[in-house]
Image (cartoon, rainbow, N blue to C red):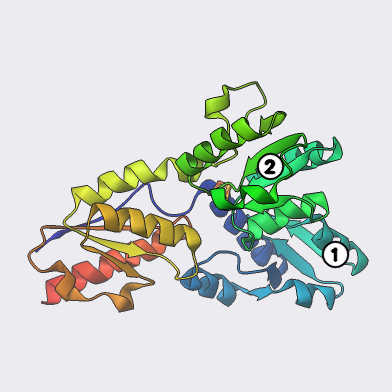
Amino acid sequence: MYKVTVDTSSGFCWGVIRTIDIAEQELENNGNLYSLGDIIHNPNEIERLGVQGLQSISVEDLKNMKNARVLIRAHGEPSSTYQIARENNIEIIDATCPVVTKVQERIRKFYDAGYQIVIFGKKEHAEVIGLVGQTNGEAIVIRTMGEIDTIDLNRKTVLFSQTTMDKPEFHRLKVVLQEKIDELIVASMEDEAVDFHAKDTICGQVSGRDKKLKQFASDNDVIVFVAGRKSSNGKVLFNICKDTNPRTHFVENESEINFDWFEGAETVGITGATSTPQWLMERVKFHIENKTIEV
Ligand code: SF4
């Protein structure tokens, strides 16, 4: 019989908890609500909120809608989305994470001051689409050092990061850019001046997780990693776990558990991505413990 523990530092970040709270409050007070894109990359949580009346729509759907109520999720949206909503008499329930809002505002400020905006991130990620949308689509998004040649090195430039990127990778990039661009500003979350080496716009809710996750993965014989297969943060954190503990297994929910994984184990740890609800990890724990009792 093994001991099963849920990782208390895993699961939703506060920005996502806030978004879901806003959605649930709206659903309770006013009934059905549309979400622009999936509220979260987790099919089980989408299903739970779907039962309450939350329905995902695309930007194309939004263009063809009128007089509806639409939730903007934690990742945020480009200015064009708000414009469409105004034109179509759509009420926006804005649940953009305040951290993302702050980054958007800073990007706009530098863009208006004539800076070239460079964002370290993934072009197709919803948050990055929202950030680029603050600059009339002019911001340059790079993911690797190899893409540096897409930047005009002679312009005054400000460097941002998508909030969920890898900190060490970003810091390597900024040092390289500092050598190449005379007038380079690295944006940070803090209002007061911070040391160049500490500057970034990476969210503390995700950047601190690696260390705790590695500890949790090495403290347990087997790890069950719970996340939606579409979650990019889930893939990154799963790989960190797997590198630390090769007996790490990915599941979307308890139906994918294979009890052979636990053979000879004394401890089983359950953890997940920032988009994994706590209730789902508890359900996986319950399933493992009860099946174990039956056996
Ligand atoms: S990871 Fe950070 S920026 Fe992203 S939603 Fe969560 S709190 Fe907000």
Is 126 above or below relative to 57? above
Which circle marks residue 143 in the picture?
none
Q: Position of residue 102 (x, y in %)?
A: 69, 40
- What amino acid type should be assigned to the residue bearing mark 2? Val
Q: Quadrant of residue 251?
A: bottom left
Q: Which mark is residue 85?
A: 1
Q: Is mark 2 within 8 Å of ligand 1?
A: no
Would residue 141 appear left or right of 220 to someone viewing this image?
right
Rendered residue at 63%/28% (across/down): 190
Residue depicted at x 66% and y 55%:
128
Q: Nearer the viewer, residue 21 or 125?
A: 125
Rendered location of residue 283, percent (x, y): 33, 67
Residue at image coords 83%, 54%: 136
Q: Which residue is mark 2?
A: 103
Instruction: Assign the N terminus to one quadrant of the image.
Output: bottom left
Q: What is the three-letter code of the residue carrying label 1? A: Ala
